[in-house]
Image (cartoon, rainbow, N blue to C red):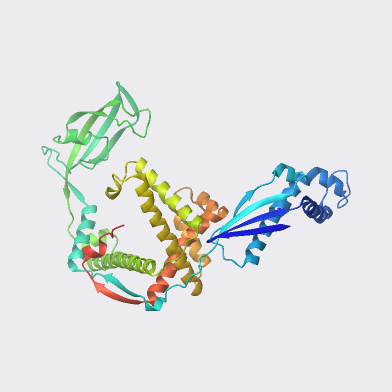
């Protein structure tokens, strides 16, 4: 085997050449390894001639030999060079693989790998950070209780002569028709609709304003062009509506009875739960602010060469996401009017920051011997699967079979553990701020 190494900055390239004779010897050894276990028709168990095995399975077995040699050679090259890879090596075959598998050509390939930069991370015990915190006020609790009451709004029956207004609820029967024919899914009895909720086809609810109990109303609407049911999209429809009741909204009193209606003991218990919820929200916002300040500090205190492939991969992911946002018409105000070159320059700088911070956090975590437990990974996997109701099993199987996907699942867990470790060790001073300042989004 011949191996030639070249280096440039944080990139390492290796040219590997393995003579066909060596491949044939490996193939012979592999055949002799499996021959005793082979059971083929026409031969006694374990007595299949090597020549027959080579004739029948030689090409497939040579494929196994080549794959094993590539992995073995790349691992040896990394070990012998005493380097720390920054990601998986990239392989580029230079041989005619059909000829190699037929045993007629040498195996030649190139391996490229970026290596971890050599740097000394900052002493985290000397970091000084401010962590904004906010107190939970009585006014905040009252505001949250009012929101809960509004979301549990009740409706009282109005007089038969009362005309429906916006935000009223109407109890009705309806039958929808297109070209005089009723269509599937266009009818219901005793349905309650809140006028102004925009839960029906645009224009439907507006035409019921002013109606009263006992009224028959003919509602004319056009289904949207992008309506989910293709057979209805863009078509004009007429709904025959019978109004049975008009009900006025009534915000419930926030008292013990209201709390009991939510399944709690009393109002004090509801206030306690609301307070804990707000504290949790404030705590999450506080940690996010502290994390952002920490990342800014780490970025400011480290300057070293970055593995080019890592930067390029990160940039491509960011740029692809940006392109999708732009194609959907969602462009940030600060990006409007900028040329593609200017945008690429800015987003490449973001990619470099992300890679730099990722390397710094990884090194701090390595020195601190921070590990991710299997339980933490499993819980993250379950949480991810829950985002796809009805497809949980498929999601879990996808991650279990995809090492790259599992790595992406582990990455934020590891990052959060390293960040928490740094915040525990660094000199962190709490600074009381207003709720508005705590929850205000930072500039990108």
In this rendering, would 25 be left or right of 191? right
Residue displayed at 45% across by 50% down: 316
Residue 296 horizontal/vertical position (percent)? 35, 66
Residue displayed at 48% across by 65% down: 376
**Where's the N terminus, which quadrant?**
bottom right
Residue displayed at 44% across by 60% down: 355
In this rendering, would 164 be left or right of 29? left
Q: Give the answer, above or below, for where 435 lies relative to 67.
A: below
Q: Give the answer, above or below, for where 187 lies relative to 257.
A: above
Residue 74 horizontal/vertical position (percent)? 65, 59
Numbered disc total: 0
Determine if residue 443 is in view.
yes
Q: In which image quadrant can residue 298 be found?
A: bottom left
Residue 380 horizontal/vertical position (percent)? 46, 60
Residue situated furthest top in the rendering: 179
Residue displayed at 57% across by 58% down: 113
**Where's the C terminus, which quadrant?**
bottom left
Q: Which sits in the foreground, 93 or 366?
A: 93
Residue 341 horizontal/vertical position (percent)? 37, 47
In this rendering, would 240 be left or right of 288? left
Q: Which sits in the foreground, 433 or 96?
A: 96
């Amino acid at each position: 085997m011949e191996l030639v190494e070249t280096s440039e900055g944080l990139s390492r390239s290796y040219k590997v050449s393995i003579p066909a004779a060596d491949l044939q010897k490996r193939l012979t050894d592999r055949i002799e390894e499996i021959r005793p276990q082979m059971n083929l028709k026409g031969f006694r168990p374990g007595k299949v001639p090597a020549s027959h095995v080579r004739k029948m399975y030689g090409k497939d077995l040579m494929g196994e030999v080549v794959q094993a040699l590539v992995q073995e050679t790349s691992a040896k090259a990394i070990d012998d060079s005493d380097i720390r890879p920054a990601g998986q090596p990239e392989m580029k075959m230079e041989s005619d693989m059909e000829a190699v598998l037929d045993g007629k050509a040498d195996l030649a390939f190139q391996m490229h790998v970026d290596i971890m930069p050599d740097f000394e991370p900052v002493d985290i015990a000397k970091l000084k950070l401010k962590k904004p915190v906010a107190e939970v006020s009585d006014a905040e609790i009252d505001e949250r209780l009012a929101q809960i009451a509004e979301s549990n709004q009740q409706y009282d029956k109005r007089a038969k002569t009362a005309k429906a207004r916006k935000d009223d609820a109407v109890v009705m029967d309806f039958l929808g028709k297109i070209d005089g024919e009723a269509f599937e899914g266009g009818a219901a009895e005793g349905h309650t609709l809140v006028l102004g909720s925009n839960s029906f086809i645009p224009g439907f609810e507006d035409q019921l304003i002013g109606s009263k109990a006992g009224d028959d109303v003919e509602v004319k609407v056009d289904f949207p062009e992008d309506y989910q049911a293709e057979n209805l999209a863009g078509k004009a429809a007429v709904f025959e509506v019978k109004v049975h009741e008009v009900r006025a909204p009534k915000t419930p009193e926030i008292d013990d009875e209201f709390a009991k209606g939510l399944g709690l003991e009393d109002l004090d218990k509801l206030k306690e739960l609301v307070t804990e919820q707000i504290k949790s929200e404030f705590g999450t916002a506080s940690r996010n602010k502290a994390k952002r300040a920490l990342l800014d500090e780490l970025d400011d205190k480290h300057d070293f060469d970055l593995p080019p492939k890592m930067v390029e991969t990160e940039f491509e992911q960011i740029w692809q996401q940006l392109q999708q946002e732009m194609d959907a018409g969602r462009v940030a105000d600060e990006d409007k009017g900028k040329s593609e070159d200017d945008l690429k320059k800015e987003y490449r700088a973001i990619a470099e920051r992300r890679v730099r911070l990722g390397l710094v956090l990884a090194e701090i975590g390595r020195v601190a011997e921070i590990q991710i437990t299997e339980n933490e990974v499993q819980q993250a996997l379950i949480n991810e699967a829950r985002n796809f109701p009805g497809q949980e099993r498929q999601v879990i199987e996808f991650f279990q079979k995809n090492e790259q996907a599992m790595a992406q699942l582990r990455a934020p867990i590891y990052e959060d553990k390293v960040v928490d470790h740094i915040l525990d060790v660094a000199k962190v001073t709490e600074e009381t701020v207003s709720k508005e300042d705590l929850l205000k989004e930072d500039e990108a």
